[in-house]
Image: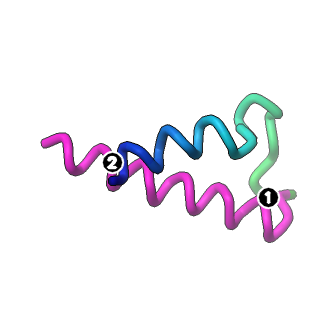
Amino acid sequence: MFKLLAKLNKILLPSFTKQQLDLAKAKKWQMAIIGWRYYVTTRALDFKK
């Protein structure tokens, strides 16, 4: 399930790394998206073990 979510995140959500967003200046909604992507990515990688 997390693999599918990770693929959807990559397609639907913006990549702040490509935009060179400074985390210290990120807005709350941007931090929420970053946190969500991190959560899903780590879970998807954990299930590959």
Residue plotted at (85% across, 64% down): 27
Could you say where residue 41 lies in the image, as x and y percent from the top left? 43, 48
Amino acid on which the number 2 mark rests in the picture? Ala
Dot 2 surroundings within 10 Å: few (below 14), some, or many (20 or more)?
some
Give the distance between the C-alpha atoms of the residues marked 2 and 1, in whole angstroms: 27 Å
Residue sitting farthest toward the left: 49
What amino acid type should be assigned to the residue bearing mark 1?
A: Ala
Q: Secondary structure at mark 2?
A: helix
The tag on residue 41 is none
Report the span colored magenta: 26-49
Residue displayed at 46% across by 50% down: 5
Q: Is residue 11 above or below residue 29?
A: above
- As for residue 32 lying within the magenta part, the answer is yes
Q: Main secondary structure of the magenta part?
A: helix
Asked if labels 1 and 2 touch by Cβ distance under 8 angstroms, the answer is: no
Is 20 contained in the magenta span?
A: no
Mark sitting on residue 44: 2
Q: Residue at x 82, y 33 (%)?
A: 19
Q: Which residue is mark 1?
A: 24
Q: Where 43 falls versus 20 (above or below)?
A: below
Residue farthest along the top direction in this orientation: 18
Q: Position of residue 15 (x, y in %)?
A: 71, 38
Pinpoint residue 22: horizontal percent, then vertical percent.
80, 47
Q: Earlier in the sequence, mark 2 or mark 1?
A: 1
Q: Position of residue 47 (x, y in %)?
A: 20, 49
Left/right placement of residue 46 relative to residue 28 reads left
Crowd tier of the residue under label 1, counting other residues whose Cα lies within 10 Å: few below 14, some 14–19, many 20 or above: few
Q: Is residue 36 left or right of residue 39?
A: right
